[in-house]
Amino acid sequence: MNRDPSQRQAGLQRRQLIQAGASAIPLAVWGPALAQQKFTFRMAHSEAISAPLTLALQKWCDLLNTRSGGRIDAQHFPGSQLGSYTQLIEQSRIGTIQGTVGGPDTEESVAPEIAATGGAPGFIFKDEAHVDKILQGPLGEEVSAVARKKTGVEFVAYAEVGFRHILSKRAVTNLETLKGLKIRVPEIKIWVDFWRRMGANPTPLPYAEQYTALSTGVIDAVEADFFSIKGFKWFEQAKHLTLSYHWFLPKAVRVNTRWLDSLPADLQALVRQSAKEVFAEQRKENRAKTDEALADLVKAGVTVHKLSAEESGKWFAAARPLFDEFGSKSAETKAMVGRILAAR
């Protein structure tokens, strides 16, 4: 519909007044509104509710919320609330969630050279000091760079759950008693290969299914750290704990790179620096509370079995060929295995 000239002139004047008014608003008024853009950060994982790692992840989320002044909305979902372990790893890669935690061994099929720093294959780490030499230095930074390039996540820090042991329905005191044991393993090839070589019967299952699988007889055993055994109450279904120290599992704190790169520079720095701060404390606390967690399991009726030095040597010898086998995946993997063993 055509309007007369006087109507068009009036409309033009109104638009000019609105534009002039908007341009007259000081930048100081617009600035805070722009600065308060919020970035949602969903941290989801499969760790037990009461585990030291879970408490540290909650602390990190709280810290991100506070130090960002609300610009980061960090939300915490422990205990497989948003999916199984493998589902959460994949979600963190594609960005459905922004963060999770998981051992570098999870990257076996994508980046086997960094999977070696996740304890693969078993017995590759001697003790906590050996782990720190590998991950809390230049090599740890290299591993994060490879993860960023190949998986779409950045390892902003390294937490840990510590050494893993065998919790079983029957006593396991040597390699003979390990034979045929139906033991749950993650859905990762190197774990299956390891336990087959040890003579057990590895059964890949999602993390959250272990209690039910123990109760129904699908499996005879799980292998895990003390905190997980206690937190998920697996000890209610299996009463024998063998201190095997077969696998030290560091936990890479994984952040989706697209999300991280979308943040302003100051918030990127906050995510990285606060993670290093929080999880350095987590590692210290985790190690301090290990004996306490073991004592709690004994009080709950768990019988502890210790391997003799001779028997431990046999277990290591049984696993030793896996180092060469794992290293054959690529020249980079072979070099990484060599660097880890050289630092023992």
Image: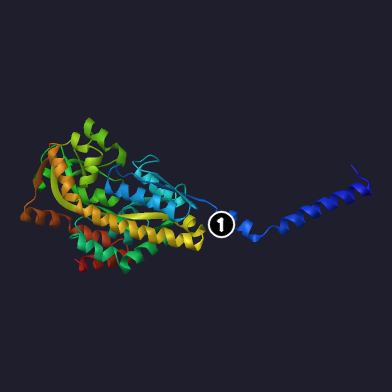
Which residue is painted at 46% across and 50% down in the image?
94
Q: Residue furthest top?
A: 216
Which residue is painted at 51% across and 60% down in the image?
264
- Count residues near mark 1 (Cα–Cα under 10 Å), then give few for <14, some for 14-19, many for 20+: few
User: Which of these two is toward me, 3 or 22?
Assistant: 22
User: Which of these two is toward me, 251 or 68?
Assistant: 68
Which residue is painted at 77% across and 52% down in the image?
18
The amino acid type found where label 1 is placed reads Ala
**Residue 160 location, quadrant:** bottom left
Which residue is painted at 18% across and 48% down in the image?
165
Whether residue 327 appears in this view of the structure is: yes
User: Which of these two is toward me, 21 or 302?
Assistant: 21
Residue 50 coordinates in the image, percent (x, y): 28, 43
Give the residue number, with chain letter if any, for mark 1.
Answer: 35
Quarter of the picture containing the N terminus is top right
Residue 99 coordinates in the image, percent (x, y): 41, 51
Quarter of the picture containing the C terminus is bottom left
Q: How is the image coloured?
A: rainbow
Against 192, is 27 above or below?
below
User: Which of these two is toward me, 144 or 70?
Assistant: 70
- Dot 1 falls on a residue whose secondary structure is helix
**Residue 181 location, quadrant:** top left
160 sits left or right of 147 in the view: left
174 sits left or right of 278 in the view: left
Residue 289 coordinates in the image, percent (x, y): 20, 50
323 sits left or right of 301 in the view: right
